[in-house]
């Protein structure tokens, strides 16, 4: 089992507020794998340029290099081996690289996602909902234009989980069990 875990790549994707970052961290901890969080990388890139997420997403619509830089970092890490990649396009990246991976999409109701984002960022739920809709529309346009990827196309995913009524630990446990690679206690 340890040899299999050393070769493991798991991608975790979903829309903002679905719980992907928290779940990815829990899965990485449970399987003793490295973790690359695409959202954190994107936030870091935004901060380096003095933008908030919504502004940076708009800039990225006209500057394809931003997404390409992010994707390249994720791709390089995925090729190195055992890792959990959390990113909207992580499954597409490993698929395009021809890598063996377990690809997971985490769904959640829009209202629940907005509530989670509002709590995380200390803002009003309506503000979070508006910001999420703006960000999602920007990403959908960028991903379709730059890559020909439709975010609603779930054909590359091995597993889809709805996190609306579940806590992150339960979702993470489902993913770990689905990989068939439970870490000994």
Image: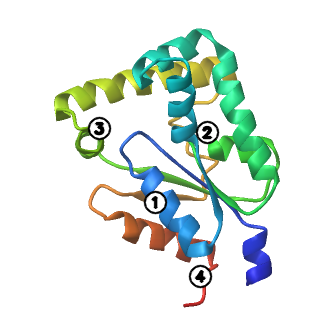
| Numbered label attached to residue 138 | none
Q: How far is mark 3 from mark 1, CA to CA? A: 18 Å
Marks 4 and 1, the one that precedes in the sequence = 1
Residue at numbered disc 1? 23
Q: How far is mark 3 from mark 2, CA to CA? A: 23 Å
Q: How far is mark 1 from mark 2, CA to CA? A: 16 Å
Residue 92, quarter of picture? top right
Residue at numbered disc 3? 121
Task: Count neighbours of disc 1 (C-alpha within 10 A) and say few if under 14, some if 14 to 19, many if 20 or more.
Answer: many
Residue at numbered disc 4? 182
Marks 2 and 4, the one that precedes in the sequence = 2
Tell me where residue 67 appears, x and y as whole percent.
Answer: 64, 25
Q: How far is mark 2 from mark 4, CA to CA? A: 25 Å
* Quadrant in the picture for the C terminus: bottom right
Marks 3 and 4, the one that precedes in the sequence = 3
Instruction: Name the side, left or right, on which 131 lies relative to 38.
Output: left
Task: Count neighbours of disc 3 (C-alpha within 10 A) and say few if under 14, some if 14 to 19, many if 20 or more.
Answer: few
- Element carrying mark 1: helix
Q: Is residue 25 above or below residue 87?
A: below
Residue depicted at 71% across the width and 28% down the height: 69
Q: How far is mark 3 from mark 4, CA to CA? A: 33 Å
| Numbered label attached to residue 89 | 2
Residue 4, quarter of picture? bottom right
Residue 149 in view (yes/no) = yes
Residue depicted at 60% across the width and 89% down the height: 184
Task: Count neighbours of disc 2 (C-alpha within 10 A) and say few if under 14, some if 14 to 19, many if 20 or more.
Answer: many
Tell me where residue 174 appears, x and y as whole percent.
Answer: 47, 71
Q: Is residue 66 above or below residue 70?
A: above
């Amino acid at each position: 089992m340890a040899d299999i875990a050393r070769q493991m790549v798991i991608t975790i994707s979903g829309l903002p507020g679905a719980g992907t970052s928290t779940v990815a961290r829990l899965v990485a901890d449970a399987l003793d794998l490295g973790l690359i969080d695409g959202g954190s990388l994107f936030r870091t890139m935004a901060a380096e340029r003095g933008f908030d997420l919504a502004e940076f997403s708009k800039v990225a619509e006209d500057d394809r290099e931003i997404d390409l830089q992010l994707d390249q970092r994720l791709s390089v890490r995925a090729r190195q081996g055992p890792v959990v990649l959390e990113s909207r396009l992580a499954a597409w990246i490993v698929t395009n690289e021809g890598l063996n991976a377990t690809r997971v999409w985490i769904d959640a109701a829009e209202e629940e996602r907005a509530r989670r984002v509002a709590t995380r960022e200390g803002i009003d739920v309506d503000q979070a909902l508006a910001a999420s809709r703006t960000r999602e529309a920007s990403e959908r346009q960028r991903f379709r234009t730059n890559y020909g990827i439709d975010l609603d196309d779930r054909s590359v995913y091995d597993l889809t989980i709805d996190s609306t009524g579940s806590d992150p630990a339960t979702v993470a446990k489902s993913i770990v069990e689905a990989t068939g690679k439970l870490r000994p206690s």
